[in-house]
């Protein structure tokens, strides 16, 4: 089949998106905790040293089998190889632009900065605990929120005991900062 009638491209420019689209505000640094940096670096190394060479080997074997236009191993392998290369480029750019901030090395303070674990209470007294992390480390199930999220923006630079206003889908809500830790 002619390439003119397929949606696949070989240029791989999908990962060359502006930072605003990739999850970062324009001109902002890509702040990360040491654990988040290590996780992304490990993923990059696994892709480069293990997965990519395995897929290249399968594609080479499939290409040697003859007709490539109807060879499923070859077609799937090439597609998977493009996905791996795209992810490698994305991770490389993210790690290159990152600035690692270790919250454990921060001087003792009750003010909220990147890496803080913050316990806050709303008007009904319900308490929640969040940890402010980088955009690539977000895990809502464990209370890890991005430093550019609405809750993080609301509490950044606040001190224990401060009452801040946070925008929610239901409108503005006042929350009180109960505890700030750096672990």
Image: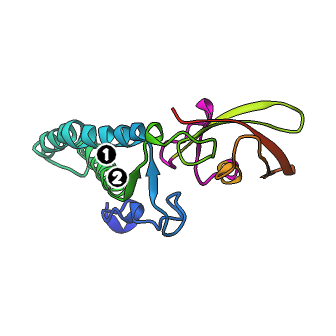
Could you give the CA–CA distance between mark 1 and mark 2, rounded to whole angstroms?
A: 22 Å
In the rendered image, which quarter contains the N terminus?
bottom left
Residue at 60% across, 54% down: 148
Q: How many residues crowd around disc 1 within 10 Å: few (fewer than 14), some, or many (20 or more)? A: some
Residue that label 2 marks: 95
- Residue lying furthest left in this view? 64
Residue 45 rendering spot, x and y as whole percentages: 25, 41
Q: In this view of the protein, which residue sits in the foreground, 155 or 8?
A: 155
Looking at the image, residue 48 sits to the left or right of residue 61; the answer is right
Q: Is residue 137 magenta?
A: yes
Looking at the image, residue 6 sits to the left or right of residue 181; the answer is left
Q: How many marks?
A: 2
Residue 14 rendering spot, x and y as whole percentages: 41, 62
Q: Identify the element where label 1 is drawn.
A: helix
Tell me if residue 51 can be seen.
yes
Residue 50 rendering spot, x and y as whole percentages: 21, 36
Q: How many residues crowd around disc 2 within 10 Å: few (fewer than 14), some, or many (20 or more)? A: some
Residue 67 rendering spot, x and y as whole percentages: 17, 49
Residue at 77% across, 46% down: 162
Looking at the image, residue 44 sits to the left or right of residue 113; the answer is left
Q: Is residue 24 magenta?
A: no
Looking at the image, residue 63 sits to the left or right of residue 19; the answer is left
The region drawn magenta spans 134-151
Residue that label 1 marks: 80
* Quadrant of res 141: top right
* Quadrant of res 89: bottom left
């Amino acid at each position: 089949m002619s390439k003119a009638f397929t949606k696949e491209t070989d240029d791989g420019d999908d990962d060359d998106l502006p930072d605003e689209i990739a999850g970062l505000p324009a001109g902002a640094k890509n702040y990360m905790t040491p654990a988040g940096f290590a996780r992304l670096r490990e993923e990059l190394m696994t892709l480069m040293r293990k997965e990519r060479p395995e897929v290249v080997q399968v594609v080479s074997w499939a290409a040697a089998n003859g007709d490539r236009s109807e060879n499923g191993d070859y077609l799937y392998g090439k597609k998977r190889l493009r996905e791996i290369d795209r992810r490698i480029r994305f991770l490389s750019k993210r790690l290159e632009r990152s600035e690692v901030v270790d919250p454990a090395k921060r001087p003792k303070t009750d003010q909220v900065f990147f890496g803080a674990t913050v316990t806050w209470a709303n008007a009904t007294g319900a308490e929640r605990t969040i940890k402010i992390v980088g955009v690539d480390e977000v895990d809502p199930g464990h209370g890890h929120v991005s430093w550019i999220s609405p809750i993080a923006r609301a509490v950044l630079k606040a001190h224990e005991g401060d009452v801040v206003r946070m925008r929610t889908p239901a409108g503005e809500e006042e929350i009180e900062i109960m505890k700030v830790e750096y672990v």
